[in-house]
Image (cartoon, grey):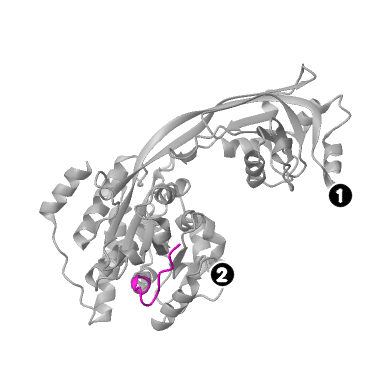
Amino acid sequence: MNRGFLALLAVSVAIQPAVLWAKPNKARLELEAQLRAHITELSSDAYDGREPGTDGEAMTLRYLGKQWFDIGLVSGTNDPANPWFAPVTIIAREPDTERAVFTRRGKRVFVPNNAVLVVTSGKRGLVENAPVLFVGKGDHIPPRAELAGRVALLLDGGSEGSERQNALLLAGASGVITVLDGDRSLEDVTAHRSRKGYALISENPGGDIEAFITPSALNGALMGTGLDLTKLKAQAEKAGFAPRTLDLAVSLEATSRETRIKTHNVIGKLPGKRPELGAVLILAHWDHFGRCAAPPAEDLICNGAVDNASGVAVLTEVARRLAKGPQPDRDIYFLATTGEEIGFMGAEAFAEDPPLPLGQIVAAFNIDTVALAPAGRPFAVVGQGMTPLDPQIAAYAKSAKRKLDDDQEANAYVRRQDGWALMRHDVPAVMISSSWSDISLVERFMESDYHRPGDQLSRGIELGGAADDVEFLTGLVRWFGDAKRVPFAAK
């Protein structure tokens, strides 16, 4: 598919005329018109919500590939077998079967089936007749020798506690049972955990097993041991609390149904004069949710105009302007990621199998949900204070006579965008946009059209700030692409 598409592009390529910046008002109108055209195309019903692995993806890839080729980019996959489109395989898992059997000294203890939920991160998870180790709130993780072969019993305390559960599993627990002793009910957890879970095929297939139990069911299982939940909680509150093995064993089993989604990142490149001095990465996610509503609703498609056709539009127009300028010292990579909406899958795949060593990336700039603010707003840095990029960003902003937001409210969203996946792999990544300097705009969008069919062009869209973003990011990428201005420190 890719080779045929590239052959078609090769015979139909038309070089765009240079944009004349002598008349700023005209140039801004042209830029906003270009942004609107991209958003109109990508968020149209014809793309059916740009869901990975669908015809909507194929249309998105064709559109972006042609745009970037016409602009003058070259393939950035650095893989002759897969030019432009880097394959990403995602596994979608849904809970299927489950069982939990509690025993004491070899005899089964009755616990109602509807009082326990068992789930696995893999295709199948199984623990047979394992001792139960009470670990309290999980504030202090026992040593591996103490956890090995045991199932940890953890107090919920009203919080989801996934980090504590994961820490116990990583430390060697055979499984974790969370007691729902706080505000969460078993129904709440079941509704949440019954959703599809996603992972890259390259990741460890898992098989970790977790269970959730109601307080009354735990008390029933503990009957005759001299303990109940109240006594266990009191023990956990004592100074010097140490985990203790209960007079209880458990067998847990869960299976999942698996579906494989074959999707793609789009990677383009503007070659630099001295690529050995590092590279700059700029990215935005192309995917959305496809059909996200059900009849009798009239509008079933999540078009994703703001989130994130607007980000891809800005990315494309930054590429256009950079391609028309002087050749940078460094390679500039342009990345349109898949699977952001289901857990940064495309960004994670890029980081796990990058087209260049990650240590070569001097800076990465993510673009997401940008068509919210009018022109003239300051620029927020999502990730401010978390990377070594801040001084150079501030220096560029000063030279460009543009104001940076002086608070860090936008950092509340740092874990909700592709840059976070890169940061976890030690890539210095931030998201910079004028829309994010006014959190009230972002929050109003989140509370209204975000991830709903209402996120479409017909509801109105603000392009002034998006055009500001194009201009700011174009200059910023040029700044970081200059090896004299931003020296490369090999990692």
The x, y position of residue 191, in whole percent, is 59, 37
**Going by the picture, which residue comes out furthest to the top?**
107
Q: Nearer the viewer, residue 107 or 80?
A: 80
Left or right of 477? Residue 199 is right
The x, y position of residue 432, in whole percent, is 44, 67
Residue at (73%, 42%) from the top-left corner? 142
Q: Is any part of residue 378 visible from this angle?
A: no
Which image quadrant: the N terminus?
A: top left
Above or below residue 440? Residue 27 is below
Q: How many marks?
A: 2
Q: Quadrant of residue 64?
A: bottom left
Q: Is any part of residue 344 visible from this angle?
A: yes
Q: Quadrant of residue 485?
A: bottom left
Left or right of 59? Residue 219 is right
Please check the rendered image and state whether residue 364 is part of the magenta-colored stretch, yes or no: no
Please check the rendered image and state whether residue 485 is part of the magenta-colored stretch, yes or no: yes
Which image quadrant: the C terminus?
A: bottom left
Q: Quadrant of residue 69?
A: bottom left
Residue at (22%, 70%) from the top-left corner? 324
The boundaries of the magenta stretch are: 479-491
The x, y position of residue 163, in whole percent, is 64, 47
Residue at (35%, 42%) from the top-left corner? 263
- Which residue matches tag 2? 408
Q: Disc 1 versus disc 2: distance between alpha carbons? A: 37 Å
**Going by the picture, which residue comes out furthest to the right?**
226
- Which residue matches tag 1? 239
Prevalent SS, magenta region: loop
Could you classify mark 1 by the number of other residues whose Cα lies within 10 Å: few (under 14), some (14-19), or many (20 or more)? few
Above or below residue 142? Residue 426 is below
